[in-house]
Image: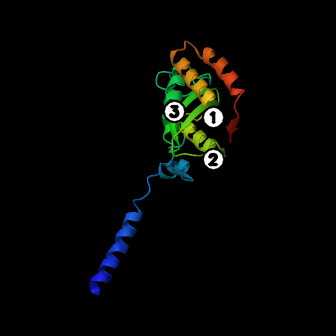
Amino acid sequence: MKKIWFLLLLTVISAALLTGCASNADTLPSPTPGATNMLDGLLPGAGEASASPDAAMPSASPENSAGPAANGEMTLESAQQAAQAMEEAVEKLSEVDDAYVVPMGDTALVGLKFTSQYQGGVDGRLKKMVLTRVQTVEKSIAKVAVTDDAALTGGIQALAETMKGASSLTDVNGKAEEMLKQLTVYGE
């Protein structure tokens, strides 16, 4: 009788320990409230601007930045780098098998191919997740136009390939604006 109780107790303890290891969800870190002002409390004067204006500003050259250039517009190289990074970020979603992204100003065109297990479509929840993923790469993106329509996704994929070989963003932006008219834009 003691063996049965011992085995039952051992089983319950094992189940409780293994429950903590069951989740493999890909989560984004949430911001900690008040974390931005913590340095001021620890080091007086650390939040103040330095004497040299150049020391306070990081270098924003197009070669090492995926963000906007000095005039607020993306360069071709930064747009290409940002598009690739955004595609990789969106593909980390468990519902998404393949993603194609074309950034255009503060909007990103996103074409999705879902995994075979995902039976849903593009809804508000998924659009919000895509926007969050895109913004982890490029903070200036405020809106996304997300589609899973095969024809539109193929168009976005072709546009992304065109951007890789384009000589300027004006070639891509004209086509992207035409495609944007066929999509619904989501933004917070």
User: The residue tagged with tag 2: helix, strand or loop?
Assistant: helix
| Residue 50, visible in the rendered structure | no
Mark drawn on residue 14: none
What is the crowding at mark 3: few (fewer than 14 residues within 10 Å), some, or many (at least 20)?
many
Which residue is at the front of the view, 107 or 120?
120
Name the residue located 55 percent from the left edge and 47 percent from the top edge.
36
Marks 1 and 3 sit apart, C-alpha to C-alpha, by 14 Å
Q: Residue at x 48, y 41 (%)?
A: 92
Q: Nearer the viewer, residue 128 or 47?
A: 128
Is residue 15 among the parts visible in the rendering?
yes
In-image side of 180 versus 55 (left or right): right
Badge 3 element: helix
Asked which secondary structure carries label 1, the reply is strand
Instruction: Specify few, some or many for label 2: CA neighbours under 10 Å numbering under 14, 14-19, or 20 or more.
Output: few
Q: Which residue is mark 3?
A: 87
Task: Say which of marks 1 and 3 sits in front.
Answer: 1
Q: Position of residue 18 (x, y in %)?
A: 37, 64
Q: Position of residue 106 (x, y in %)?
A: 65, 30
Q: Which residue is mark 2?
A: 125
Q: Quote the CA–CA distance across marks 2 and 3.
A: 18 Å
Among the two numbered marks 1 and 2 on one chain, the one whose residue lies closer to the N terminus: 2
**Residue 9 spot, x, y in % from top left:** 34, 78
Q: Quadrant of the C terminus?
A: top right
Residue that numbered label 1 is attached to: 147
Q: Residue furthest left?
A: 3
The kind of residue on which mark 3 rests is Glu
Image quarter of the N terminus? bottom left
The three-letter amino acid code for the residue at tag 1 is: Thr
